[in-house]
Amino acid sequence: MKFYRFRSSVTVRLVLGLIILCLIVGRASRMSAHNPGFTQSAPTKIASSITIDGTIDSVGAETVWAPASQLDLLPNNCADIIANAGQPFNVFSLNDGTNLYLAFDIPDTTPSNQDALFLIFDPNHSDGATLGVGDRALHLIFSNTAANNTAPTNADSENYQVAVAGAWPAPTAGLPAGVVAKYSRFPNKWQVEMRLPLAFFPVAAGGTMGAAFIYLNKASVEDCDGDGLPEDFYAAFPSALSLVANATVLNQVMNPSLWGDLNLGPAVPAVGFQPPLCCFSTDIDFTPSGQPFTAGTPVNIRAQVHNLHPTSVANNVNVEIRVHNFGTGGGVISPFPLSTVIPSIAASSSSFSSPVTWPSPPPGVHGCIRAEIKPPTNVNSPYTIAGGQDTAQHNIDVACVPQGQRKMLRFVAFNPEERELRIRLAAQRLLPPNQEGLTFELQQPDRPLRPKEEWPVQLVVTAPANLPITQVPRSQSHLPPTAGGTASPPLRERSGTEPVTVAVKGGDRLHLTTSGAVDLDGRGPIPETGPDGRDVTKELGGERRFLLADPSASKFGGALIGSFDAFATSFLIGSEMTLTAPDKVEKLWLAVNDLDGGYGDNTGAGFDVEISTLPPLQVAADLKRAAQAQQLTLPQMNIAAVSTARITAGDRSVYNLITNHGGLTYQLLVVEAKGHVTGGFFPPFGLPWWLFYLLLLLLLIVLLLFVWLYRRKSRQQTGHV
């Protein structure tokens, strides 16, 4: 179940960080008349013990409120935005056949007399793209920052009831007759309790109405971007509601088909992924596990979903898998999106989806793998989607930076909206104490991005020559150019030497960097090649058997390859790769990719492979605490794409809000310069290589034309002397 999302404002001076979702997308496949997948249950209970006093007593006399639904994490400051963190925002809801009871536990640590809560209802569930007669809204402002058992005054509350379809009318001061609300201020949070007669809607017990909620958190002192204005945050149910600049809140909540459902019947199971949701989740599993992906080698991707309900079974859970261009949520790579269904997830249990197959990754792709739980399409299998837990992603890359050199890391910024947006990249550095000398240059898009436009971005990392290398377990292996010729299972013709084996543990996260060269035919016509290999299809033929078990193996002749099962299956490693050892394996086999029986004439220095065992991935908050405790091992850069908007809540105030459009993470290994390829020269101004070379060609043509004109003029002048 999706509920509250958060925003804040940002400018070009912003140096923040955020690990967030790859891409926020719209929902599809409607289960009910309203936005599918967004359902809050208000089961029927005996509620006589509840006293509406602004204090939720779920562990004392008012146990009937329990359980709470965690809707999202509400941020309160710049640090929360950086870490994609906050405190759980909880709602309690039930009905007793006569009244609807709602309570909100709001972890707002920055009380303001302009904090506000909106509740919007479609009582008759009429849906439609415009407001219908009878649609209602309540607006509560928490003007008393020391409130205790306080009822909103007429000046601090108002209600709306649509009499003519299509637009919200002018509000009426105060709450409607029969509606009771109290709120209290506690350390670091608000609590609100409400009783609303079902006759207020009207809706029968056991029925369903449309609903939407917005909480506006007006900050008072936090200035994240140094512009002299405090930043603000908001949260919304459903998350598909999006507030844009220069508009009042209710003017953007006029489409009931985008609202969620408030179900007064029994609770349905909630499903979700486990945190961390971005940019790494253990709920995403893909094999082969290495990145970058091997061009042309099929990748099987699956996602694990958790049923959060203690007694109900979740059936026919829809999951969608996408792979985006690596970056802040770039375009979806074909043939994605691919859908799969988990038939059943037992109560308080978890299940993996069936794998979807990416048949042929393009060369050199560091993809953002994203899994999203979609709303039910089977009306007999209802489930809700846990707030803030509908999406998981793997969007992380590891790169070596040699001492005294620069490394250029490329990714894309992306505008996912249907309107032009100015995208800014917010960056968060998490550096171990002994590696704070690393410097970063992050290029920003220099203009607003058009709808769905990608923009190439470069992160340039510079490591001083005296910077200590990253302290992780390392091992070195040397492969002779003949390694792999007697692989098991044996090739038809035995030649060369055995593959090199390296001891590993199941679950290890390994980063391999390789240098050196091999010559596949001695002094023959095939040039020497490095660990990434070369296309030898013309020389050796594409139909002959190579050790690399892949249809495109001839395109990687001489490359470094690996296997976890003695080359029953295999994968490309190349000059640099990050991979995870499968469970229960004990060895990694390394070899040169050559023809069956073709290893005997191989020459060259061979390959030197350095294998770094990386620490387990952690969420941003854990990394921050680890850095503060000087336990952080890997330098890390978190990057998020954001845009800014302003919005008003009635005539009360202007809120400065940020929208997050996607993010990624780089982890870095500072290594000795010897044996590692430098970042080398790269185009200035963030230009793509093709454009850089085109400009060079045009410049050369202009120079040649200038020389030709100059010489022609000189000859003409000489002829007239």
Image (spheres, rainbow, N blue to C red):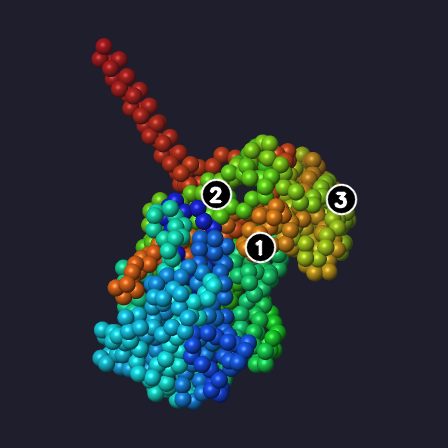
Who's the residue at 34% across and 68% down the image? 141
Q: Which residue is mark 2?
A: 459
Work out whether mark 1 precedes mark 2 in sequence or the reverse, and give the earlier one: 2
Task: Pick the residue in front: 135 or 474.
Answer: 135
Identity, as a three-letter code, of the amino acid under mark 3: Gly
Q: Nearer the viewer, residue 281 or 646?
A: 646
Q: Which residue is mark 1?
A: 622
Q: Which mark is residue 519?
A: none
- Closer to the chain start, of discs 1 and 3, is 3
Residue that badge 3 annotates: 496
Name the residue at 76% across, 44% down: 496
Q: Is the residue marked by circle 1 packed among few (<14), some (14-19), or many (20+) residues within 10 Å? A: few
Q: Residues within 10 Å of mark 2 (few under 14, many from 20)?
A: some
- In the figure, is residue 635 to the left or right of 103? right
Query: Which residue occupies the foreground of this view, 102 or 266?
Result: 102
Q: Amino acid at mark 2?
A: Leu
Q: Nearer the viewer, residue 164 or 329?
A: 164
Q: Mark 1 vs mark 2: give the one in front.
A: 1
Dots 2, 3 in contact, CB < 8 A: no
- Give SS at disc 2: strand
Label whose residue precedes the other's in the sequence (2 or 3): 2
Q: Quick one: SS at disc 3?
A: loop
Dividing the picture into quadrants, the one containing residue 604 is top right
Determine whether 341 is above or below 10 in the image: below
| Position above or below: 714 against 60 | above
Q: Residue at x 57, y 81 (%)?
A: 312
The answer to whether residue 317 of the structure is visible from this angle is no
**Along the horizontal axis of the image, is 407 left or right of 144?**
right
**In the image, residue 183 lies at what x, y percent?**
40, 72
Q: Quadrant of residue 534?
A: top right
